[in-house]
């Protein structure tokens, strides 16, 4: 599988948009949570994107697969943070469902990318 740049991947573009949305969301948290839970949420969403970018077109497929695996782990961490944010009433059910659905789609896309790299 050949790519000119990481931006060619739809999953990368989706994760990029989610990073921006998560960043904007956390700015609306109470000030005392902006630097605690907000920071964790921003970092995990950004790390999913960074892990994917790190491995792209690496000479060694196993390194790229590690990046995909890392991105999937960060997606799971982000989903956990989002559930906590919801329980603390910083977002409503609609927002939670939107983000969880988007991250689920990205996770499935990463799984498909992983499968195609292994074959």
Image (spheres, grey):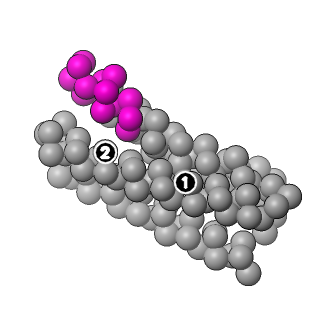
Which residue corresponds to the image point at 31% horizontal and 51% vertical from the top-left?
80
Task: Determine the secondary structure under disc 2.
Answer: helix
Q: Is residue 30 magenta?
A: yes
Foreground pick, 70 / 16: 70
Which residue corresponds to the image point at 53% horizontal and 42% vertical from the top-left?
47
Which residue corresponds to the image point at 41% horizontal and 63% vertical from the top-left?
104
Q: Would residue 75 be visible to someone looking at this image?
A: yes
Give the left or right position of residue 118, taking residue 4 as reference: left
Residue stretch rendered in magenta on the structure = 28-41
Q: Which residue is mark 2?
A: 81
Q: Quadrant of the N terminus?
A: bottom right
Q: Residues within 10 Å of mark 1 (few under 14, many from 20)?
A: many
Q: Residue extending furthest bottom?
A: 119
Residue 71, numbered circle: 1
Check the image and report above or below for 119 versus 57.
Answer: below
Percent from the top left, x then y, of residue 33? 25, 25
Task: Determine the secondary structure under disc 1.
Answer: helix
Task: Name the N-terminal-most of marks 1 and 2.
Answer: 1
Percent from the top left, x then y, of residue 7? 68, 49
């Amino acid at each position: 599988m050949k790519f000119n740049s990481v931006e060619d991947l739809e999953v990368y573009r989706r994760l990029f948009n989610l990073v921006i949305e998560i960043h904007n969301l956390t700015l609306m948290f109470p000030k005392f949570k902006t630097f605690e839970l907000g920071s964790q949420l921003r970092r995990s969403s950004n790390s999913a994107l960074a892990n994917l970018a790190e491995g792209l077109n690496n000479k060694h497929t196993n390194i790229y697969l590690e990046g995909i695996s890392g991105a999937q782990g960060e997606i799971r961490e982000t989903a956990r943070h989002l559930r906590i944010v919801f329980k603390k009433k910083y977002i409503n059910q609609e927002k939670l469902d939107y983000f969880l659905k988007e991250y689920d789609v990205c996770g499935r896309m990463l799984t498909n990318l992983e499968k195609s790299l292994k074959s």
